[in-house]
Image: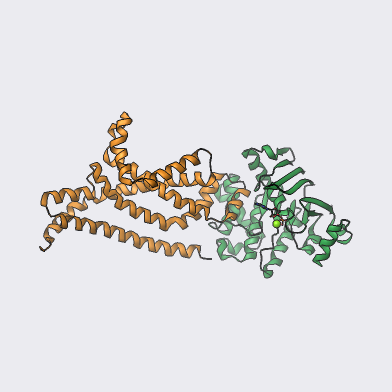
Chain colours: A orange, B green
Amino acid sequence: MRPLDFDYMLSILPVLLKYLPLTMGMASISMLLALGLSCLVAIIRVLQIPILNSLSKVFISFFRGTPLLVQLFLFYYGLPQIFTSLTALDGVSAAIIGLTLHFSAYMAESIRAAILGVDRSQWEAARSIGMSEGQMMRRIILPQAARVAAPTLVNYFIDLIKSTSLAFTLGVTELMGATQKEAAGSFLYFESFILVALIYWVIVEILSHIQKVLEQRLGKAVAR
Amino acid sequence: MISVRGLKKSYNGQKVLNGIDLDIERGERIVIIGPSGTGKSTLLRTLNFLEQPDAGTISFDTLKIDVANASSADIKKLRLHTAFVFQNYALFANRTAQENIAEGLQVVRGWKKKDALKRASEILSEIGLSDKADAYPAALSGGQQQRVGIGRAMAANADLILVDEPTSALDPEWVEEVLQLMGKVAAAHQTMLIVTHEMRFARDIADRVLFMEGGRIVEQGPPEKIFSQPDDPRLKQFLRKLL
Ligand SMILES: Nc1ncnc2c1ncn2[C@@H]1O[C@H](COP(=O)(O)OP(=O)(O)O)[C@@H](O)[C@H]1O
Ligand SMILES: [Mg+2]
C-alpha cells in the first residue's frame, strides 16, 4: 500500500470547489422546477382531472420505471435526432430537464400521499365557504401537506444533488466531471475520488442536519 | 325566500333523501330532529353541494338551481348564499382563529385583507374570543373551536346558515357555551337550519321543527306542537325514547 498524497488532495480541493456552484445550481434549479411540476401532477392526480390524470399516471410510471441515466441519454443524445430544432440543447440544460422530470415523478407521489393525508374536514370547510378548487389547494391543503412532505422532499433533494454527478456523462464539467479531469491528468484516482466523495458527503450531512431541525420545528407546530 | 323542491340523493342505490320539499322564510330558525341515519346531515350537505344531489331544485330568491345540471358557477353562488357549521368544527388548521373568520371574506368575497381581519376581529369580540385571535385551532378547546366555527359562518353574512349537530362532538363541559352562542345568533333572526339532539335548545329557539325519518320530512310544525302533541307514531316513538 502506498501512502495517500494529501498535498495533491489539498491542491485540487480549491479547483474542485470552483465547480460546486454549478453542481448546486443544477440541483437547486432542478429541485425548484421539480417542486412546481410535482405539485401540479399531484393535484391533477388528487382531483382526478380527466385526461391529465391518465397522462400523469403514464408520466410517473415511465420516469420511475426507467433508469435516470437512460433518461438523461435520451434527452441529450436521443431527442435532438428526432426534434431537430433541439440541436442546441446543451448538457447542463439536458441534465436539468432530465433530473427535473425524474424527480418530479417521485416527488409527485409523495406530495399526493401528503395531500390525501390532509383531513377531509379541511377540504369540506374550504369548499363550503365557496373557495375554488385552486384556492383551496393553494391556501389550505398544500400548506398542510407541505409540513408532512417536507422531510421526504429534503431526502429527494439530497438524492438529486448526488444525481447531478451523472451530468458528467453528458459532457458537463460539474463537480464529478472536474474530478474526472484532474484524476486523468494526475493518475491519482483514489485521492481525487475520495476527495470528491467527501465533498458530496459534507454537503449531504449539512442538509441532513437542516432536515432534522426542520422536522423538530414542524413536529412542534403540528403537535396537538 | 328559500325553496327546495324534490331534493333527492342516493348512495350506491340506497335512497337517503326521498324528495325533500322545504320552504324557508327569511329570518326563520328551523330545527331538524330525527333518528340517526335518516339523512339529516345529507340534507344540509346537499344544500351546500358538499354532496352532489341527484335531482331537485334549490332556489334563493331569484337564483334557481336545477341540482342535476348545476354548473360550478351555480355551485359557487349557492355556497355564497349559505354557510356551514360542522359537527367537528373543521377550522382551517393552518390559520389562526381570526384568519379562519377572515379567510372567506378575503379569498371568496374579495375583501381587502385588512378589512377582512378587522371584521373578523369584531366577530371575535361578539363571540367572546378576542383574546384568542392569534391562536391556532390546535390550541383552542372544543368549545372555543366551535365558537370560531360559528363566527366563520356569521362572517359570511349568508342567507342561510346550515348547522350540523354543533355540540355532538363536544365534551359536555363545552356544550353550554356553544348553545348560548347559537342562541345569540338565533335571537338576531339569522335564517338557520339546525340539526341537533338538544331538545331544550330546539324548543327555545326554533320557529319550526322538522322531524325527519327515512329520508323524508315526516312531520313539521311549531315546537310546542311537535314536542307536546305529535301526530306521527314514529315521531311519538322518537320523542319517547329521548325522555
Ligand atoms: N358518503 C356516504 N357514502 C355512503 N353512504 C352515506 C354517505 N353519507 C351518508 N351515507 C348514508 O346515508 C344515510 C344517511 O346519513 P346521514 O345523512 O349522515 O344521516 P343523519 O345525519 O340523519 O344521521 C346513512 O345510512 C349513511 O350511512
Ligand atoms: Mg348526521
Q: In the displayed structure, does residue A224 sit left or right of residue A2? A: right
What residue is shown at x 31% (from left), y 58% (from top)? Answer: A204
Residue B100 position by quadrant: bottom right
**Left or right: B224, with A91 as reference point:** right
Q: Is residue A173 visible?
A: yes
Q: Position of residue B189 (x, y in %)?
A: 76, 53
Considering depth in this image, is A207 or A194 the residue closer to the camera? A194
Residue drawn at x 43%, y 65% as measured from the top left: A216
Which quadrant of the figure contains the N terminus of chain A?
Answer: bottom left
**Displayed-image quarter of ligand 1:** bottom right
In the picture shown, does residue A155 fall above or below A104?
below
Residue B24: where, in percent of width, then height? 78, 47
Task: Please indicate, yes or no, whether residue B111 appears anywhere in the rendered image.
Answer: no
Number of dots carrying numbers: 0
User: Hey, which quadrant is residue A4 in on the image?
Assistant: bottom left
In the depicted structure, whether residue B133 falls above or below residue A77:
below
Q: State the image coordinates of residue B111 (x, y, percent, origin top left).
A: 58, 46
Report whether A170 appears left or right of A109: left
- Front-lying residue, B130 or B30: B30
- At 84% across and 58% down in the image, what residue appears? B235
Q: Which one is nearer the viewer's eye here, B104 or B172?
A: B172
The location of residue B49, given as percent across then percent down, is 66, 46
Residue found at the very far top of the displayed protein: A84
Q: In the visual, does B129 lie left or right of B39? A: left
